[in-house]
Image: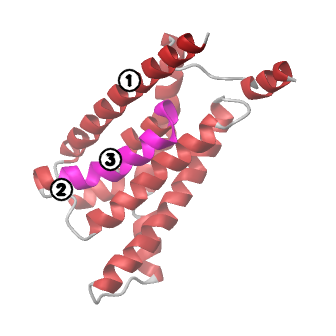
Amino acid sequence: MEKTTKATDNKNHIQNLVLAAMLTAVGIVLPFFTGQIPQIGNMLLPMHLPVLVCGLICGWQYGGITGFVLPLLRYMLFGMPPMPNGISMAFELAAYGAIAGFLYNHSRWQCIISLYRCLLIAMVGGRIVWGAASMVVLGLGGGAFTWQMFLAGAFLNAIPGIILQLVLIPALMLALHRTGLVRFRREQRTLSRAAGE
């Protein structure tokens, strides 16, 4: 029984590593569809999509690491996103992946409602982390990060990307559920606790 559990854990770990690597690759390529134009990228937020999906499917650890590595790796390869914004973005995306993954995988019911709830909380949490990181990074560089910059960068300019995330990610999760690659859990933790008592 213990060997079976370890084998299953190893299989899940390898599967999550492969998925996280694939989603990192998607995150590197996806911004090319915005034509490498920062204004369009700031509106559509192409790197956010694979990070949120990674957190939801693979778990908070994989989502957090993928989110942190993705903008830094993309900067090393293509010089985008520009620094120091890329550092703030690394913390923001790490928060997206970690928060979405943690909340979703600890939801009592995994369904569309809990998926939307997790996405919305992750989006707000990630933007708060981005604001805090931007304040620190710009402060160290002698600049200032104003409330207007936060509102514009986190919400006003990002409305098309937020809508895109709220439409595409649930549709993708439903499609993966129908194929059997992702399973929605219903009170699994509660049932397993009751069985253990």
Q: Which residue is mark 3?
A: 47
Name the foreground residue: 86 vs 9: 9
Residue 49 appears left or right of 9: left
Q: Position of residue 197 (x, y in %)?
A: 88, 24
Q: Is residue 68 above or below residue 29?
A: below
Q: Is residue 138 above or below residue 122?
A: below
Q: Quadrant of the N terminus?
A: top right
SS at badge 2: helix
Q: Quadrant of residue 142?
A: bottom left
Q: Is residue 132 above or below residue 10?
A: below
Q: Categorize mark 2 by other alpha carbons within 10 Å: few (<14), some (14-19), many (20+).
A: some
Q: Which residue is mark 2?
A: 75
Q: Position of residue 46 (x, y in %)?
A: 32, 46
| Circle 1 or circle 2, nearest the eye | 1
Residue 176 visible in the current orientation: yes
Which span is picked out in magenta?
Answer: 56-74
SS at badge 3: loop
Q: Is residue 10 above or below residue 48?
A: above
Whole-number angstrom distance, CA of label 3 to CA of label 1: 23 Å
Q: Quadrant of residue 90?
A: bottom left
Residue 63 highlighted magenta (yes or no): yes
